[in-house]
Amino acid sequence: MEMMQTLVQHRIGLVIWLYTPKYVNKLKNYGLLHYVSRKLNYAVLYVDEQEVEKTMNQLQSLHFVREIERSYQTEMPYTYDGLLEELDKQAQAVNKEKEEQSIGLFTRL
């Protein structure tokens, strides 16, 4: 049995703010149209990572596109190992600073 290797395509999400959702079907030509909000006039489009800049320039030239934002989902961590310990250390540092400031106020009196 042959082992098939699958290539994972990295995609970037684009949030496209629209003047009107009337022409939203034209966005299907540029990538995978994931979601459309007709009430808030935006669409979420996934594009291959190599073609993001080119696609953003092409989309910006369309008359019904108001603004394009990149999704930050790819930059978010998928695992949260050690996150609680790190947040605990940060909270302790902030509490220590506040305590030192309050002690400094009482010594001035």
Image (spheres, helix red, strand yellow):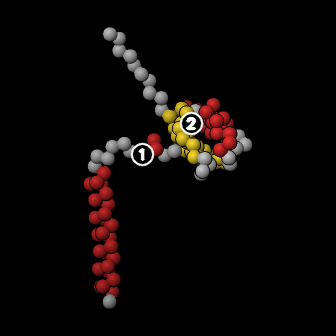
Report the Cα–Cα distance between label 2 and label 1. 22 Å
Query: Can residue 57 be spotted in the picture?
Result: no
Q: Which residue is mark 2?
A: 33
> Does 65 sit above or below residue 92?
above
Q: Position of residue 17 (x, y in %)?
A: 62, 47
Q: Amino acid at mark 2?
A: Leu
Q: Position of residue 20 (x, y in %)?
A: 68, 47
| Picture disc at residue 38 | none
Q: Position of residue 63 (x, y in %)?
A: 73, 43
Report the residue at 48% width, 29% height from top: 9
Q: Nearer the viewer, residue 32 or 14?
A: 32
> Does 101 sit above or below residue 17?
below
Report the residue at 68% width, 39% height from top: 23
Closer to the eye: label 2 or 1: 2
Q: Which residue is mark 1?
A: 76
Report the residue at 29% width, 74% height from top: 99
Name the quadrant containing residue 1.
top left
Location of the C terminus by quadrant is bottom left
